[in-house]
Image (tube, rainbow, N blue to C red):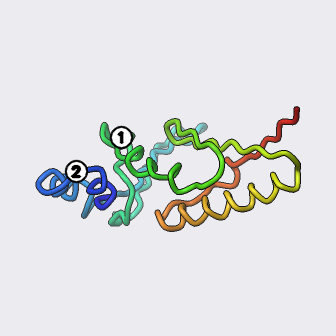
Amino acid sequence: MLSKLETYGIRSIVNQWFKSYLCNRKQCVKINYTENISRISVQYNSTVKETKGGVPQDSVLGPVLFLFYINDLPINLQRGTTTLFADDINIQMEATNITLLNDIIKEVTQHFASWFHLNKLVINPDKTIAISFHA
């Protein structure tokens, strides 16, 4: 994240501020559970662990930092038109026949997967779909 911010011109003292904001963070999960019949409440706490990456959830800067993080995706895909909106990514591809379109889809998918791997992101297959439109 810090190197991406530096690429966009956020350097020196401001980059150091972001480093202090993003690094050495810890998190845990707390669950409050109330049993329906007895109405007994129990709280479960996970152990505190250091975060390895990402931006703090429910933070004001989180969405902006996420956009900085994914903003270079479109220039790394050579084919297709990329549209980014919040955490959704749409890639439109077109071809004169289905065989060529399948080749383009394979190529774009490989570039896409490579970019995700390099940026330590995971593609969620349950939220990934392909739609084909024909004229």
Q: Mark 1: few, some, or many residues within 10 Å (few <14, many ≥20)?
A: few
Q: Relative to 41, is 13 above or below?
A: below
Q: CA distance from mark 2 to mark 1?
A: 13 Å
Image label count? 2
Q: Nearer the viewer, residue 72 or 66?
A: 72
Q: Residue at x 60, y 38 (%)?
A: 37
For disc 2, the neighbor class at 10 Å (few under 14, some 14 to 19, many from 20) is some
Foreground pick, 51 / 17: 17
How far across and down, in percent of the image, does residue 4 sit? 34, 57
Residue 38 at x, y = what percent? 56, 40
**Outermost residue toward the top?**
135
Q: Secondary structure at mark 2?
A: loop
Residue at point 38% right, 61% down? 53
Q: Which mark is residue 89?
A: none
Q: Which residue is mark 1?
A: 64
Which amino acid type corresponds to the residue marked 1 in the rendered image?
A: Val
Q: Earlier in the sequence, mark 2 or mark 1?
A: 2
Q: Are marks 2 and 1 in contact (CB under 8 Å)?
A: no
The N terminus - image quarter: bottom left
Q: Position of residue 122 (x, y in %)?
A: 56, 60
Describe the element under mark 1 as helix, strand or loop: helix
76 with respect to 66 (left or right): right
Could you tell me the amino acid type at mark 2? Ile
- Residue displayed at 16% across by 53% down: 17
Residue in view at x 69 percent, y 49 percent = 128
| Residue at numbered disc 2 | 10
In the picture, the quarter occupied by the C terminus is top right
